[in-house]
Amino acid sequence: MADAQLRPILPQRMGRVEFLPALMFTAFIAFFAWSLHQAEVDIGELIAGIPNMARIGADMIPPATDRAVPMMLSLLVTFQMALVGTVVGILLSVPLAVLASSNHTPHPWLYTASRGLISLFRTVPDLAWALFFVASVGLGPFAGTLTIIVDTIGFCGRFFAENMEEADPGPAEALTAIGGTKLDIVTCAAIPCALPAMINTSLFSLEKAVRASVVLGLVGAGGIGVELSVSMEMFRYDQAATIVLMIFFLVMAVERFSSLARKRLFARQ
C-alpha cells in the first residue's frame, strides 16, 4: 500500500481532443490535399523531367563568355536600379511612416489612409507594378526603378511605422513636458530612437531590391533580367549560366555588405 502511494502519477500523453481545433485541423488537411491537386503536383512528371534537367545542365557547362561585357553592364544597371529605387523609397517611407504610426500621426484619417496606401503597395506583386510602369513610361530601367520605389515604400513604410510605435517613449514624453510640438517629437525623439531598427530594415530592403530587380527585367523593366530572358528564349543555356553566376555573386556581395553593416551598427549600441 505504501509503495502504491509513493508511485509517481504520470501525466497523460495526450489531453482530451477539443472539437473545434480538431475540425480546423481536418479542414486544413482537406484543403491542403485539394491544393496539391489544383497545383497539379505530379511526382511522376518531376521524375520524367529529370533527363531534361540534366540536358539543360549539360548545355550550361561551360558558361559562355562571348557576351561577358554587355552582361556585366546590364548587371551594373540592375544594381543601380535597386540602389536608386531603395534610397528614394526609404526617403519617401519616413514621412509616410510618421503618418502611419498610431502615436505620432496628426489625425486618425491620415493614419487610416497611410496604412491603406502602404498595404496597397505591399499587396500588389512586383511584377504587376512592373507591368503597370512599363505600360506607363515604356520599357527600360526607369520602369524597374519606379517598381523598386513602390515596393520599398510598402516594405519599409510598415516596419518604420512599427519601429516608431515601439520606440522608447521617454524622450517623447520629456519633449512633450517642456512644450515640444509634434514635429519636434518626431524629429528629435521618435526617429532618433527608432533609427537603428530603421537602418536594419533599410539594409534588408536593399537585399530584397537587388533580388527583385533581376526578375523585373523579365517583363521589360531593364537590367540583367532582359539578358536572361533573351538567353533562355534563344536556348543559349551557356549564356544563361553566366548570367546566373553573375547574379549570384552580386546578391552575395550585397548580402555580405549588409551583414557587415548590421554588425558594425549593433556593435556600437
Image (tube, rainbow, N blue to C red):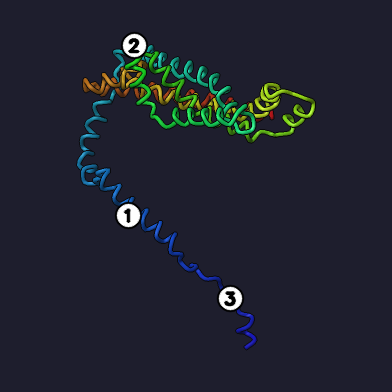
Residue 120 shows in this picture:
yes
Q: Which residue is at a point 74% across and 32% down the rendered structure image?
A: 173
Q: Residue at horizontal 26%, vertical 48%?
A: 37
Q: Secondary structure at mark 1?
A: helix
Q: Identify the amino acid type marked 1.
A: Ala
* Residue at numbered disc 1: 30
Would you place residue 182 above or below residue 53 in this image? above
Mark closer to the observer (3, 1): 1
Residue 245: image quadrant is top left
Labels 3 and 1: the sequence-earlier one = 3
The number of numbered discs placed on residues in the rendered structure image is: 3
Query: Which marked residue is nearer to the observer: mark 3 or mark 2?
Result: 3
- Amino acid at pointer 3: Ile
How far is the residue under mark 3 from the one under mark 1?
A: 38 Å
First in sequence, mark 2 or 1: give its number. 1
Q: Is residue 222 left or right of residue 157?
A: left
In the displayed structure image, the side of residue 35 where residue 9 appears, left or right: right
Closest to the observer: 128 or 233? 128
Q: Mark 3 — residue?
A: 9
Q: Amino acid at mark 2?
A: Pro
In terms of image quadrants, where is residue 193? top right
- Relative depth, front residue between 3 and 96: 96
Instruction: Say above or below: 168 vs 214.
Output: below
Label 2, secondary structure: give it: helix
Q: Name which of mark 3 and mark 2 comes first in the sequence.
A: 3
Check contact, mark 3 vs mark 1: CB within 8 A: no
Q: What residue did someone put label 2 on?
A: 70
- The x, y position of residue 34, in whole percent, is 29, 50
Q: Assign a secondary structure to mark 3.
A: loop
Is residue 245 at all visible to an observer of this figure? no
Circles 2 and 1, Cβ within 8 Å, touching? The answer is no
